[in-house]
Image (cartoon, grey):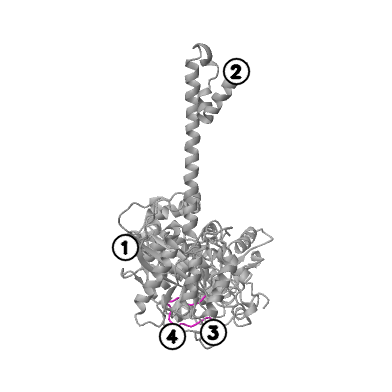
Amino acid sequence: SHFSNNSQKVPVIVAGNKIDLIRPTSHTTDTEEQSLIRSRQLLVSLLQRFRFVRQCIKCSAKNVLRVADIFIKAQQAVLFPFAPLYDLSCGKLTQQCQKAFTRIFRMFDQDHDGLLSNEELDQFQYQTFRVPLVERDLAGWKKAVARNNTIDEEVVRDGKFTVAGFLAIFDVFITQNRLDVPWKVLRKFGYQNDLTLKIAPEKRPSLRLSTGSRQFLTNLFLQFDSDRDGILDDTDLKQIFSILTEPSLPPWHPMRASILLDSESTFSFPASFSSSLPSCPDSPRESSGGGGTDENLSVSASGITILSEGSIPTVGGDIMPPAHSVVTLPNMTFLEWMGHWHMLSAISPGVTREELFRLGYVSEKRKRKGGLGRNANTLKSTPQSQLPSEEIKVVVLSKAACGKTAFLHLLCGKNVHDTYPTRRPETCTTHRVMKQPKNSLDKKPEEADIVVHYILTEVPEGINHDKLKEVIASPHGNNKTRKLVVFLFDDQTSLQYAIDLEQELLHDEIPRVFLSNRGNDIQEATKHCQQLDLEPPLIVNVLEADQTKNRDTILTHLAKCVVDENVKAKPHALKKKREAARRRKMMWLGGLFSMSVAVAVGVGVLWSGKHNNTEGGESKSRFRWLTQMLFGSKVESTAGERAITS
């Protein structure tokens, strides 16, 4: 009773002592073989009835028979726990164990074909056990896995192991009571006894996705695009995130984001999610963040959160089914896929790094250290994946009821009439392919296409200004992210509120732009922009009939304010640029003059040395010619006066 009610599932070894006293009696009719069969049946029934019992061993303390085996098995039961790996009720690996080994499979699937070749399996063998794999062992394992296959899935295809075949290898080890092998593999790749993945912290995670992580996400998209149409559907997305712990959903989905982010951050549906998706049940973390007064409003450490799921209907009942069986994920193109990862990286770089690691991404530093992925190949890229990209973090500030939510809905392609009061920062993402603005130093005549990912954050009135100033002004870590502050106004009061925020929060190096909703009070705003030498306010109308043209115009203007140096988005930027150019010119002229003087001095020294033996006063001063050049006839008159005096 004590062990059966133990929630820790402590393993138990049953030792049947005094085996030396068991002797067959004369009146029994059972043979020795039948006695062994009956004894084995009793042991099997004991193991099936009590799941915490690991093994049953008969021994004799008097004759020291199998006593050492008991302590060895007890030690192994603690060092290599059985319960996290195998489900006796189903007779197969647990779901968490399957996810762990599938992640390891993906880490070594370097050509991203969903199969492990002999070379990839040999790399796994050497990386884990430091022993190369022999061809004979490979052939033996393929036969053993195919022979012991108890599932309908294909385990070997074209001479390569599938995911099911890779899992079947460890199933064989477990059924043979060789638990040390799977545990050595799992612990090698960071898994603990409860199969949770241990992730080493990083002091200053990057706000931007690295080149390696972008290539990994690109390969992931191309690998799981089952019908090769350039779109990830619901099945494809669930397959990608199937190796994560429940809820096995994308990190930008609120059901998973509420677990990943801290209490001050709240994820919401991005623009691509429909409002019919169920949200997760209320938790203390979520309930502490919702509601409250304006004094409780704050910005997370990254300054950005994703739209709140408060308006999403919940699923009734106390028991939530698995997330993947309830949620229908919307289709995503490649640019939408990358845009959401850029958004997550801007919100929380640490969470992004952890999620990529859970999906099987290994950084270049870890690859060089462990010898993993040295021969990694990339899949055939798409035209969209070959375009250069820029990420712009746009913070929208205004007084309440100025239309910030409708403005963001317009940019993200949502219904502009479906608005609601916001009480905490909300973020969405969108993108646009546009011509890259020409740099003044760029001599290329043609303009290349560029993908601009917009990370749009709406900040409600009443936010903590000190925290917001820190978020806007200070880049995270050593990575300077492109930023733009948008001030939206629709009357004189909201314009003055925007000007006060600008003076309090921004310094001259932060780009900003003023937008007038419906064109109200445009004269005062234009005058203010002229004083700061900024671009004139852009008039926007979220209710305009041609939403597509309106959206493209706004997005193009926002991008140019950041990436085009000819657009005046910083106060007095052109004046400072001219002054800097003038200072550089003066420094250049000063350096040229100093160099000329030095050359002249050197020539004078050489010339004087050659004529050192000439007659009379010609050799009295080697540098008289330089003195005359600098001081003119004044020196000559002084010399004449000295001659008269003498």
Tag 4 or tag 3, which sits nearer the N-term? 3
Tag 3 or tag 1, which sits nearer the N-term? 3
Residue 545: x and y in percent read 35, 83
Q: What's the distance in space between the residues labelled 4 and 1, CA to CA?
A: 35 Å
- Going by the numbered disc 1, the residue's amino acid type is Pro
Q: Which residue is mark 1?
A: 383
Q: Which residue is mark 4?
A: 417
Q: Nearer the viewer, residue 318 or 75?
A: 318
Q: Secondary structure at mark 3?
A: loop
* The C terminus: image quadrant: top right
Q: Which residue is mark 3?
A: 319
Tag 4 or tag 2, which sits nearer the N-term? 4
What range of the chain is rendered magenta? 267-281
Residue 280: x and y in percent read 53, 81
Q: Residues within 10 Å of mark 1 (few under 14, many from 20)?
A: few
Q: Secondary structure at mark 2?
A: helix
Q: What's the distance in space between the residues labelled 1 and 3, CA to CA?
A: 45 Å
